[in-house]
Image: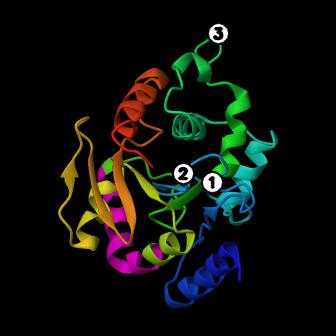
Amino acid sequence: MSKVEQIEKLFKDWKTEHEFDIFCKDGIVDEKEFGKNLPEIVFLLKDANIEKEDESDVCKNLLDTANGKSNFGKMWKVLCMWAKITENPNTRFSDCCDDKFDIKDSLREYLKRFSVVNLSKEHGKGVNNQDELNAKLSKSVRNYYDYTRKEINIIDPSIVICCGTYHQILDEYEVYDKILPSGARYFNADGKIFLEMYHPGSYTSYSMLFAYFKEVYSDFEL
């Protein structure tokens, strides 16, 4: 059974045990391309910004984006830029951006080469208040992080980059975390590195998100 098939089976069990308005599937975007020339990465995000059942397959949406069929939004541009840094830590910001300081469209290809897991499998459309979102994420962790942990372990990445989700999951692992020279925090669990990182959709410029991720990632040799 492939990893994607194992995740699908897990999702069926997940939906049997817990009720969802809309269950948003995620995981490995493209199993053949996953980890190609990169460390095997999971970006642990918050929730999926969708509102319709037929949009609830995050991996299908990302494949459409990678193939130029849908909009290449800021969050995905940032993740592709970060993935490029993991491929080549000597990457410069000018390698990622065009003459208008937007992220190059050619970076779409990186969407196929990493995995995405949302902490909440409920759709996130319309949740804009930060306190409301934090309460939602805390509820998701409390109710079914055991399933999220199983999903991550099926994917079995070398590194889980926690994009604004680090502190929500830290207590679930009952470990002490450490501080890198860059100031970012991390811990080791289940044979993986869990790394604190900004959310890619945060109100921060591409250049600052590039520079910070590059500095943090340089602390590791994967």
Left or right position of 139 against 174: right
Q: CA distance from mark 3 to mark 1?
A: 29 Å
Q: CA distance from mark 2 to mark 1?
A: 6 Å
Rendered view: 3 above or below 176: below
Q: Residue at x 56, y 52 (%)?
A: 49
Left or right position of 82 against 196: right
- Residue picked out by circle 1: 35
Q: Are marks 2 and 1 in contact (CB under 8 Å)?
A: yes
| Magenta stretch secondary structure, dominant | helix
Q: Nearer the viewer, residue 219 or 11?
A: 219
- Residue picked out by circle 3: 99
- Residue picked out by circle 2: 39
Q: CA distance from mark 3 to mark 2?
A: 29 Å
Q: Nearer the viewer, mark 3 or mark 2?
A: 2
Q: Which residues are magenta?
A: 131-148
Q: Nearer the viewer, residue 193 or 212?
A: 193
